[in-house]
Image (tube, coloured by chain):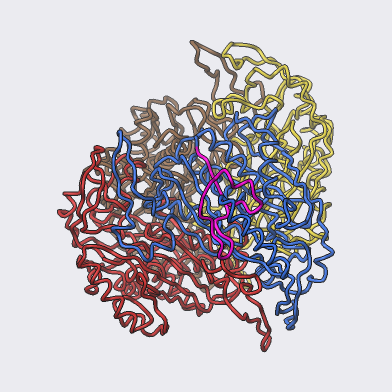
Chain colours: A brown, B yellow, C red, D blue
Amino acid sequence: MTNCIGKSFTLSIFGESHGTGVGGTVSGCPANLELKIEDIQKELDRRKPGQSSITTQRKEEDKVHIFSGVYDNITTGQPIDIFIYNKDADSSKYEALLKIHRPGHADYTYSKKYGHRDWRGGGFSSGRLTAPIVAAGAIAKKILRDHNIKIIGYTKAIGEIEAENIDFDEIEKNSVRCPDNEKAKLMENKILEIKNEGDSIGGLVEVVAKGVLAGLGGPRFDNLKGEFDKAFHSSGAITNIGYGAGSKARYMRGSEFNDQMYSENGKIKFYSNNSGGIQGGITNGQDIEVSLTIRPTPSISKEQKTVDIYGNNTIIKIEGRHDPCLCPRIVPVAEALMAIVLVDQLKQNNYLK
Amino acid sequence: MTNCIGKSFTLSIFGESHGTGVGGTVSGCPANLELKIEDIQKELDRRKPGQSSITTQRKEEDKVHIFSGVYDNITTGQPIDIFIYNKDADSSKYEALLKIHRPGHADYTYSKKYGHRDWRGGGFSSGRLTAPIVAAGAIAKKILRDHNIKIIGYTKAIGEIEAENIDFDEIEKNSVRCPDNEKAKLMENKILEIKNEGDSIGGLVEVVAKGVLAGLGGPRFDNLKGEFDKAFHSSGAITNIGYGAGSKARYMRGSEFNDQMYSENGKIKFYSNNSGGIQGGITNGQDIEVSLTIRPTPSISKEQKTVDIYGNNTIIKIEGRHDPCLCPRIVPVAEALMAIVLVDQLKQNNYLK
Amino acid sequence: MTNCIGKSFTLSIFGESHGTGVGGTVSGCPANLELKIEDIQKELDRRKPGQSSITTQRKEEDKVHIFSGVYDNITTGQPIDIFIYNKDADSSKYEALLKIHRPGHADYTYSKKYGHRDWRGGGFSSGRLTAPIVAAGAIAKKILRDHNIKIIGYTKAIGEIEAENIDFDEIEKNSVRCPDNEKAKLMENKILEIKNEGDSIGGLVEVVAKGVLAGLGGPRFDNLKGEFDKAFHSSGAITNIGYGAGSKARYMRGSEFNDQMYSENGKIKFYSNNSGGIQGGITNGQDIEVSLTIRPTPSISKEQKTVDIYGNNTIIKIEGRHDPCLCPRIVPVAEALMAIVLVDQLKQNNYLK
Amino acid sequence: MTNCIGKSFTLSIFGESHGTGVGGTVSGCPANLELKIEDIQKELDRRKPGQSSITTQRKEEDKVHIFSGVYDNITTGQPIDIFIYNKDADSSKYEALLKIHRPGHADYTYSKKYGHRDWRGGGFSSGRLTAPIVAAGAIAKKILRDHNIKIIGYTKAIGEIEAENIDFDEIEKNSVRCPDNEKAKLMENKILEIKNEGDSIGGLVEVVAKGVLAGLGGPRFDNLKGEFDKAFHSSGAITNIGYGAGSKARYMRGSEFNDQMYSENGKIKFYSNNSGGIQGGITNGQDIEVSLTIRPTPSISKEQKTVDIYGNNTIIKIEGRHDPCLCPRIVPVAEALMAIVLVDQLKQNNYLK
């Protein structure tokens, strides 16, 4: 189903960027979990627009409502429905675009698939649909915490600028969400520079899961990498996904790539983590390490060649309030998606009631 | 399900490398399609071992049997069951490995998940399970042909050596399946050199679908990239998957990445294909372009550090007949997986009865 | 998934009887369908409590809100989210029951499965969850209408009293929803009599689909009867489901049961409809005829023996406002479920874009 | 998927009555289960044709082959593929029927769905496809035994003749599989009488699961009754399915139907089992009791009116070797289906690794 992910712990989403709001329903959450509205709100605040000078200035408080499944801050075991009203849904800026296919967007493909598109913004394809994902991810993270699993996402690179001195404590201290404070400043400057040019820029987001048990996932069509990729690609902004050594594996010898093992105090350990924590589709207990290439934001104010819905050649300049770089706000989304997949795995593998 | 892929056109697989054989069941194939055993056999022959000096010398004729769903070379619309007997299942070489976790393999993760592993070879995790995938892919390709969709896979790079002068007619003329005949020779030499060192090497495989209709796939959790990745990762050998500009998108500006459009003779065309033919999860009618990073073969005869099933530190040298590079034989597998996913999409989108 | 039905046209539901409200998300609805709030409201009004003297006196206006997927009364092709606020959620009557398992209810089984139960009413197991089903069914019915398929549900029997002179035009003219006006009066009197005794009574609801195309459904595990049953049993009140001759088939000869065929003006017709329109899991173009046995309402004010949550034997008398007979209000629910399944089938079988 | 059942413990089937054979693949079976070929064969022997004078005289030894997933009589945790060759596939008797739609069969509906049908017999719709179901059921039963769950199926009635003195030990001692030895004789005579008339007769099969834990199944669309029905209806021969009081619930008062509870020695017990062991979709620990109405066999040698594939009116007399009553051979099939569903539930509910 287009709007649904998961097998035992599931999320279905709905909503549009310029409609009443966006939301989702989480099914399969264990009963008797403590869940406060703040647990969800604080994650949404990390995703919401208008956080800094390098994100869109669109103002949305993104206040979350829980419509079911939680009673007196305790989950009931039944579906949890979450809703977030749209506040700043000013679609006047979009009216000019009503009849033009925006390059890099899903306008053309949606119109081919559905015979029309939602001209008030991206509609269901809008980045705004990541809000219920982040909300569901907040629930998943609470569950993971009880299993001592921690998920950390960050911006690894913006264009050519790449983090080197990794300190996870730095991530939330800068607006780029970069674990290298010095590089973060360079990144911020770069993004502002690009923004002033009316352009956008791509980057690299990494997500790490720490404390994962060995034995999650499965072989073949249950390969955990496939499950993660399916989740991550619910965002249209990802062009490349690598695990562990990722694209570097191409240059490696088997003797170099293979994660050799040793035993220490009765525990099996590895000399390297080129497999990114997943072998034969199944976790081996090492950190899961994923690298996501994020394309530059499609909405730019520079002139672009395109066609209108009647098939006429035309020129477009997209005004409006857009992120010049998607990375900082994709970080909590990527974390949420990884958390949701891992909780589904815990449930399928009998670690949750 | 671990052994099943697809929603409307489905494949379930079974078998072990050193058991009776391997096979699969295809469900949802249209009735009244002409299907000869040769249609399947010729694709299996591209995957089978022992094709050249750079692949494993294990001898398997991989003769395919159709047990159901086809009558007088015509499909009945009911499940097609395919079976391939194992012939050269000499597991004596494996006996020495019976109690040692091979680095880079799924031995350790399988034992953590299932409480045991199949020591006669990879068991269900064996590359041999790609045979029924290739067989099902042959059926899918026949269906695609009727819709003028063509799938082309090839080795793009081995280590540092990368194809430059791409000529698809060259692919099947060299043992590496490289579309650049000159680079193919360099690749072959490189692989033989690595093989003599008792080591293995990684590479890059690309798969292209030509003639795809716009409108396949779907938004969000139905994103076609997610569907493809889930299929590709049924092979444990892939460490990175990119679409269109792939990992290069990181360095690009929006004005550079966006595939700008124009209209010509009433047809919408694109100035570039950085999105790899998929926008917002949905095909736009351009070629689908996927790039798969293939890790070096895990089985190498060089000494490696590891642990046995009792947790003792030990050293392993894997004798036996292994591919020094997986790329040439993964090409037909990757094509098959892309074909299977596309036929499932055609069916879900009402192009097949 | 517990809260989800369908494959291509899907519904996921959420909510509790005594929480904020109940709702659901419909995915896979075709774009460009005219859909007004009244289309949904009028079906909800058929299900809502307080319609007559023989239904519960609980007052709920059950006003429906559409949060997404519809713009200017036209569907967008994206998920349609529906929400209905709870108004008359007086749970004070339930407080006495907080710690006692009500016989015939899911109290005990929920507590065994989830380790707790929602004492404010049935929670997710409440009949109130049929409201979003009826809402989704209203959308499905609109789609069916465009394919000339009509669904008619009615009360066939209450206890021993059974409709004989069937006139579908009578159904909505009496409070029992019985197509036999005379028997309807007897039924109403019977229900009031039972209500005054503090008891409840069972009955028979039938649902018919007219105008169905041949070829829907599928063999084996796709058998359309299985699909319908799975949908109908989302209500906990159904104890028996029959198709066509149903339970009478037991007494029949093959020569009597088989629906013999003839051709008339180039159209294939049947001499009987003992198969209820489904053969080998697939529709044959005759009316689909289903018969649902509805158990008596579990909540009764008569004394019953039971246990409390501590395992002590006790006596319960359930006060509150309950339907003495479920049939009249289950009719629109059964129609909705049949409509949802049929639209999913139309979509899977390529009759909907 | 047409040929697949289950979520965590799954079965996919394939084959035709008059092709090479029939088979299936079981996925999700726990590793390290002892499984001998005899465990499966003995169940198949209960289903195979030619067992007695009241079943078809078609001779099939139905020898089962295991192609994967079992090594040295121990399951590996990977897919178990089962195959049964067709031996007595004499389709000459069918040739006359090649172009005529047999009443009561799926000939007409298959031809409407697939644009053709398998004239060599029922093809995929053949009762022969229940053989792999019984084989998979044998595996499921072994698993259930380890959880002290026992499944008992039997013929409750043939036409008007109904078992009264139920003694489960009698079931396998008569050819009807009836637990009332005296009534069994009457049933046998009745069936032979019907057979001599060239006709067939319907009946009632009941299946009981003993020792089931409370808490299996789920609410709403996961209702265990829905899961069972979906499985049972993979046979086209069932016209009606009831649980517990079943169709009798229609006549009952709430005070009579509700299964009142009491506590005894710290265990919760029930005064009745009108719910058939399932409340709100979830097991309550009582026996699961299902009643299946079996229609009379469609293939009869009496003359019947029908049409040929060109739409001409004609008369058909079906010669060949057919069961005059399906009940005796459906008993092991119904048991198998219940066992498969219950194992899937155990797995989903964390009782199996």
Residue A184 showing in the rendered view = yes
Residue A85 coordinates in the image, percent (x, y): 28, 57
Q: Quadrant of residue C312?
A: top left
Residue A302 coordinates in the image, percent (x, y): 44, 56
* Residue drawn at 74 percent across, 58 percent down: D56
Looking at the image, residue A38 sits to the left or right of residue B322; the answer is left
* Residue drawn at 45 percent across, 75 percent down: C151
Q: Residue furthest left?
A: C92
Task: Identify which residue, C139 or B232, lies in the foreground.
Answer: C139
Looking at the image, residue A132 sits to the left or right of residue D132; the answer is left
Is residue B209 shown above or below B95?
below
Residue A86 showing in the rendered view = no
Q: Residue furthest front?
A: D182
Residue B129 coordinates in the image, percent (x, y): 70, 38
* Residue drawn at 72 percent across, 16 percent down: B96
Tell me where the magenta segment starts and ends, as one range: D149-178
Task: Identify which residue, D141 or A183, lies in the foreground.
Answer: D141
Q: Quadrant of the C terminus of chain A?
A: top left
In this rendering, the count of numbered labels is 0
Is residue B73 shown above or below B198?
below
Looking at the image, residue B23 sits to the left or right of residue A330; the answer is right
* Residue drawn at 69 percent across, 30 percent down: D71
Task: Identify which residue, A96 or C26, lies in the foreground.
Answer: C26
Q: Is residue D155 magenta?
A: yes
Q: Is residue C107 magenta?
A: no
Residue A290 coordinates in the image, percent (x, y): 50, 35
Q: Residue furthest bottom?
A: C265
